[in-house]
């Protein structure tokens, strides 16, 4: 896939000249109008629009951006007023939440990350851009790149999981896909990595809650995926709702100016999150909306989403000298620069015939299936009960087997149930209709009457129970955090009753997060994490269950044994009294960093996932065991497919810096490669890691690489692998 990287960050002289000449003609109200984004949520309510006299607002240049309008003729209506009836003809820019697909809905991003396949995600993001651009969207409020180590937090569903390195790879891929320079619409999309920054560190995993972490953690864990997105050319960023150690991100000079502008010299647009400027008042950072406007613009926030601090107060703040005109000019400059770079002045209108031809195109739907297949993670397969033979008599039990709406996950604006293939419909591709009975058994969440007895009866008549359980889509996502992460409602009771029959259970779990399911994991012979897998979910599940697709997904967020372990993640510190091993039993150790009632290890670790074949690792080689700072570490290992079917293996490389001026994690992912091997085939997998990339934020808060001894592993997940050592002088 050639990378049509539409970068918005290299300044070109003629654009800058056009920006300056336009800026010089603008009145203060017109400048402020460029910093205002308003908008009804999709589907657009035209009566509401008229009632708010939106035409006049656009004509007078008082609003220059909308969010989540996705109806071409309405967008063109607004654009025509802006371009042909306003004094300076500055086009509007339309943004929308296209998080994992516009109408062709892919698996949730946490699932997509489990493919460990950036090239695939770039293709999926490009499909999203094709469809969004076809309806007139110029700006996609994605990728969500928040590192998340707390599955109580509902928005873990939207990101790439717990690891910055993997998060960087996915951020780059998505930005490239969204900002592809040759979309069918002939127009462009600008990406918007979010939520800048550290939103996933919400205390207690409760959305919007306080985050409080060191500047070192900010720089080494939460910032890297954003920097990767900017390096891939992302032209905007969205500030987060949360405060960071006392200063809300939306008015935080350290992240909005010192880091973004002074250190990174990034020229893009900072958009607030939804009313996050007004939120400065309940945060207790601003006494009123005028103060909120002042703090935000001075910190470096360019455009305000929905709340009205800028339109209501910026002019008077400038008149009073509380905000220098230069600050408003610089924010306006960035917005104009983006609009020029997007080509909106030359190409402001949407071809209204395009959507029908493009939306849900067969190749888009085929890609959604491919991504869904590769995103599912086989967590258990006792006795190789999977893949099933088509002669298997199944009892299909559970509230998610015949479910459409929850397959869309927590963040899909276009939810058309008829687009979805359910698990039952997927099975129909493999089994005659009389080959299975289906009993929901109980609802997903509430404790309404159940027909567990009917489910048990069906199980008694079957060879295998296919149990399809999990969360509803609205149990994850924004403002949907949970404290209990087991199966909701009475689903575990249903599983208990089925386990009591002694019939083998193949369990498919559909969720927006890692769940805490130790009991279920013990009851099931096979366990497949299918996530909320988009419009092709059902077919992908069936393809895997019957072996047409060999599962290759691997976890990008740890699955805890218990909520009490949270946060549990692989790249943890060693502490001064480490447990001898992560599975050390409680009471087995005194004065060690252990629990009395659970091992430290998660139920399923980062990087883990099974296949229907077997991959063996041998012969680790380190080309140069002693390296200098400017060198490149070259490590290789031989991977063999020793099973009887072709498969893909995600080979992972981890390092550990043994001693540093600050303590270092016990492991850090520094490379991964997804390889496809035929049965019996073996391949030497080679990694190159620049020593310069083995650094961290030192005592002086600057990035540093220190000499010393390192461990290195090449293996199938974060807990196993061939071990070696090297040193940096
Ligand atoms: C929401 C979300 C953000 C989204 C924005 C616009 O509150 O935090 O991810 O892009 O508002 O819908």
Image: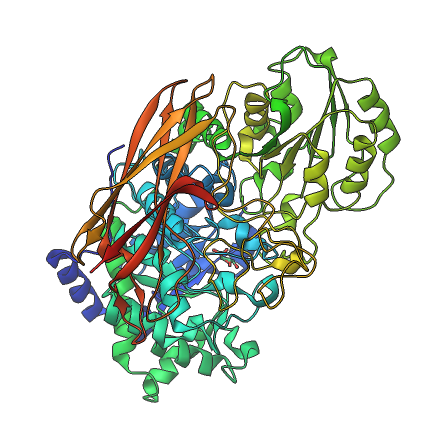
Q: 192 or 30, which is in the foreground?
A: 192
For residue 107, side relative to residue 270 (left or right): right
The structure residue drawn at horizontal position 84% and vertical position 27%, both measured from the top left corner, is 456
Query: Which quarter of the image is occupied by the N terminus?
Result: top left
Name of the residue lying farthest toward the bottom: 320
The structure residue drawn at horizontal position 49% and vertical position 69%, both measured from the top left corner, is 576
Q: Is residue 433 above or below residue 35?
A: above
Q: Is residue 78 visible?
A: no
Q: How is the image coloured?
A: rainbow
Residue 570, position as x, y percentages in the image: 48, 53
Q: 493 or 652, which is in the foreground?
A: 652
Q: Is residue 14 above or below residue 20?
A: above
Q: Is residue 477 visible?
A: yes
Residue 261, position as x, y percentages in the image: 26, 69
Query: Which quarter of the image is occupied by the C terminus?
Result: bottom left
Residue 126, position as x, y percentages in the image: 36, 37
Image quadrant in which you'd find residue 659 = bottom left
For residue 198, side relative to residue 267 (left or right): right
Q: Is residue 511 above or below residue 505?
A: below
The structure residue drawn at horizontal position 30% and vertical position 70%, both measured from the top left corner, is 259
Q: 196 or 160, which is in the foreground?
A: 160
Residue 212, position as x, y percentages in the image: 50, 73
Q: 388 or 170, which is in the foreground?
A: 388
Image quadrant in which you'd find residue 636 = top left
Name of the residue lying farthest toward the left: 13
Total number of numbered discs in the rendering:
0
């Amino acid at each position: 896939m050639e990378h049509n990287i539409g970068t918005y960050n290299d300044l070109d002289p003629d654009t800058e000249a056009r920006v300056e000449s336009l800026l010089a003609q603008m009145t203060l109200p017109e400048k402020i109008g460029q910093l205002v984004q308003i908008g009804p949520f999709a589907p657009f309510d035209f009566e509401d629009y008229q009632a708010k006299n939106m035409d006049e607002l656009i004509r007078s240049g008082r609003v220059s951006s909308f969010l989540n309008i996705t109806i071409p003729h309405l967008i063109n209506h607004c654009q025509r007023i802006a371009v042909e009836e306003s004094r300076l003809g500055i086009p509007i820019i339309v943004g929308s939440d296209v998080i994992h697909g516009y109408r062709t809905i892919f698996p949730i991003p946490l699932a997509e990350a489990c493919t460990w396949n950036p090239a695939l995600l770039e293709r999926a993001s490009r499909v999203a851009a094709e469809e969004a651009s076809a309806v007139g969207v110029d700006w996609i409020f994605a990728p969500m790149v928040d590192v998340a180590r707390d599955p109580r937090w509902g928005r873990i569903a939207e990101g790439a999981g717990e690891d910055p390195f993997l998060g960087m790879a996915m951020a780059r891929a998505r930005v490239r896909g969204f900002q592809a320079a040759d979309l069918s619409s002939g127009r462009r999309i600008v990406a918007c990595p979010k939520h800048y920054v550290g939103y996933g560190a919400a205390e207690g995993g409760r959305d919007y809650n306080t985050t409080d972490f060191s500047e070192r953690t900010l720089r080494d864990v939460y910032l890297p995926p954003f920097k990767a997105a900017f390096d891939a050319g992302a032209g905007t960023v969205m500030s987060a709702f949360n405060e960071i150690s006392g200063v809300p991100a939306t008015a935080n000079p350290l992240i909005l100016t010192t880091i973004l502008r002074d250190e990174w010299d990034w020229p893009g647009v900072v958009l607030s999150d939804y009313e996050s400027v007004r939120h400065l008042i309940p945060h207790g950072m601003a006494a009123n909306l005028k103060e909120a406007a002042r703090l935000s613009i001075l910190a470096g926030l360019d455009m305000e989403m929905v709340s009205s601090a800028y339109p209501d107060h910026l002019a008077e703040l400038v008149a009073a000298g509380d905000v220098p005109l230069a600050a408003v000019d610089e924010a306006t400059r960035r917005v104009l620069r983006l609009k020029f770079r997007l080509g909106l002045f030359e190409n402001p209108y949407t071809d209204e015939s395009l959507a029908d031809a493009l939306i849900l195109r067969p190749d888009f739907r085929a890609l959604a299936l491919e991504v869904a297949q590769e995103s599912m993670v086989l967590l258990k397969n006792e006795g190789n009960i999977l893949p099933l033979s088509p002669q298997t008599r199944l009892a299909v039990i559970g509230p998610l087997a015949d479910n459409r709406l929850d397959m869309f996950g927590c963040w899909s604006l276009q939810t058309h149930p008829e687009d979805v293939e359910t698990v039952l419909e997927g099975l129909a591709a493999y089994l005659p209709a009389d080959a299975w009975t289906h009993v929901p058994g109980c609802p997903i969440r509430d404790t309404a009457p159940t027909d567990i007895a009917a489910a048990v009866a069906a199980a008694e008549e079957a060879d295998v129970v296919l149990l399809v359980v999990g969360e509803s889509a609205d149990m994850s996502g924004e403002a949907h955090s949970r404290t209990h992460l087991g199966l909701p409602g009475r689903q575990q009771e249903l599983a208990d009753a089925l386990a009591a029959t002694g019939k083998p259970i193949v369990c498919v779990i559909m969720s927006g997060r890692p769940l805490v399911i130790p009991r279920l994991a013990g009851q099931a012979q096979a366990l497949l994490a299918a996530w909320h897998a988009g419009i092709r979910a059902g077919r992908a599940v069936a393809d895997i269950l019957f072996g047409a697709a060999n599962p290759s997904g691997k976890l990008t967020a740890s699955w805890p044994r218990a909520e009490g372990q949270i946060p549990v993640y692989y790249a943890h510190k060693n502490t001064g009294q480490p447990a001898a091993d992560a599975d050390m039993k409680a009471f087995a150790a005194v004065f060690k960093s252990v629990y009395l009632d659970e091992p430290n290890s998660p139920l399923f670790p980062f990087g883990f996932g099974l296949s229907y074949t077997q991959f063996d690792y041998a012969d680790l080689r380190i080309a140069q065991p002693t390296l200098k700072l400017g060198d490149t570490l070259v490590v290789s290992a031989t991977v063999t497919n020793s099973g009887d079917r072709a498969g893909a293996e995600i080979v992972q490389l981890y390092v550990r810096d043994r001693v540093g001026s600050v303590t270092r994690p016990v492991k850090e992912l520094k490379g991964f490669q997804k390889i496809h091997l035929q049965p019996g085939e073996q391949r030497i997998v080679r990694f190159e890691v620049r020593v310069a990339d083995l650094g961290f934020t030192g005592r002086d808060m600057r990035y540093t690489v220190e000499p010393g001894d390192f461990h290195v592993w090449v293996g199938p997940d974060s807990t196993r692998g061939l071990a070696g050592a090297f040193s940096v002088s």
